[in-house]
Image: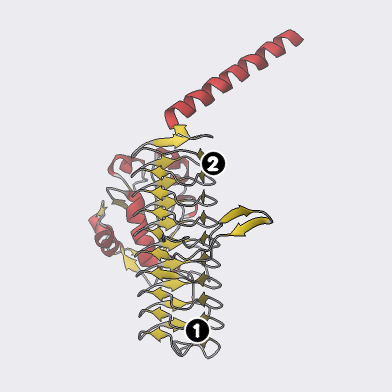
Amino acid sequence: MMQNEFFPPHSGITLAELAAKTGAELSDASAGGRIVRSVSPVARAGDGDVCYILSRRNRADLETCKATAIYCEKALVSLIPPHIPVLIAKSAHTAFALAGGLLHPAGLRPASMTTASQNISSATFVDPTARLEEGVEIEPMAVIGAGAEIGSGTRIGPGAVIGPNVKIGRDCTIAAGATVQVALVGNNVIIHNGARIGQDGFGYAPGPRGMLKIVQVGRVIIQDHVEIGANTTIDRGTMDDTVVGEGTKIDNLVQIGHNVRIGRHCGIVSQVGIAGSTVIGDGVMIGGAAGVNGHIKIGDGAQIAAMSGVLADVPPGEKFGGVPARPLKDYLREVAETLSRYDSRTKDKGANND
């Protein structure tokens, strides 16, 4: 087990307890008293570590693994060396995520920057008209604007700015340097370092002397259990609201334009750009660096491959990829045909040079 000063090992959880709390079955009941303190990748797991495998590709790493236990699904149990207890789970990925949260709860949210015992640092500015429930923590150099409301258990990181009349629910974390304005934020929301929420959107009309700014008077609505990555930007609506649905997870460096509506439990990966007034359904997954056109609809459960350019509506449940994005099977077939033709031309050129 490698020591990590940022996320030190847990004081210890028995395998029996870990199995019970993560919904796993321990293969060897006699090993239930063994202690786990940390998580680790398979290749360097040692005594006190727990790790997981999802496929047979980890077979080589298992030969030298010295973990206290390994999560895997039933079909992979035979791969685990006999000296390592197995935590058998229906979804090893999910069970391991639960285990990581138990062993390293501090790693689930941006870290506090101070060890001061006071809830509200003397080096903050909190407007007298702001309303803070009991148990709110505000770290140095944060600014809380007039009429803002913040629920109990919420922590505002150093240098964060909460604008006038913003409402933030309970048990949220607004990390260092984040800015939240013209927004209503639900409960248990995490907004990472440097995120920008509620600035005006990119809206202009051509005029005789150049571009005329269109007023942006909508809001940003962020529902419960949303997580927003570092340096991500979410513009407020022009006249309607920009909405991020319950349970949606947004990576770092994502741009969400004005009036966009994102459904529940979506996953949006780094460097995605979503243009204004697009509607995204529930359970949609968008891969990294994809660009999504404005004023279109992406149906429930759709999946967009990384680096795609989505120009038109995507039906529910479909997998799209490429530029312009089209059904993934069509795109992959076209790529295969293109590569085959290229390979044939290369071989013909080589033969002619002989």
Give the residue type at disc 2: Met
Camera-side residue: 271 or 324?
A: 324
Q: How crowded is mark 1: few (under 14 residues within 10 Å), some or many (20 or more)?
A: few
Quadrant where the C terminus is found in the figure = top right
For the question of whether residue 176 can be seen, the reply is yes
User: Image check: 322 left or right of 152?
Assistant: right
> How far across and down, in percent of the image, does residue 234 sit?
49, 60
Q: For mark 2, what is the residue?
A: 307
For the question of whether residue 354 can be seen, the reply is no
The residue sitting at 55% across, 51% down in the picture is 271
Give the residue type at disc 1: Thr
> How far across and down, in percent of the image, does residue 86 sit?
31, 51
> How far across and down, in percent of the image, does residue 115 sit?
50, 84
Q: Nearer the viewer, mark 1 or mark 2?
A: 2
Q: For mark 1, what is the residue?
A: 115
Regarding mark 1 in the picture, which secondary structure is present there?
loop
Dot placed on the residue nearer the N-terminal end, 1 or 2:
1
> How far across and down, in percent of the image, does residue 302 sit?
37, 41
Q: On the image, which quarter does residue 51 sit in? A: bottom left
- Spatial separation of the CA atoms under disc 1 and disc 2: 42 Å
Q: How crowded is mark 2: few (under 14 residues within 10 Å), some or many (20 or more)?
A: some
Camera-side residue: 145 or 3?
A: 145
The residue sitting at 43% across, 72% down in the picture is 173
Camera-side residue: 202 or 54?
A: 202
- Is residue 226 placed above or below 87 in the rendered structure? below
Q: On the image, which quarter does residue 205 sit in? A: bottom right
Regarding mark 2 in the picture, which secondary structure is present there?
loop
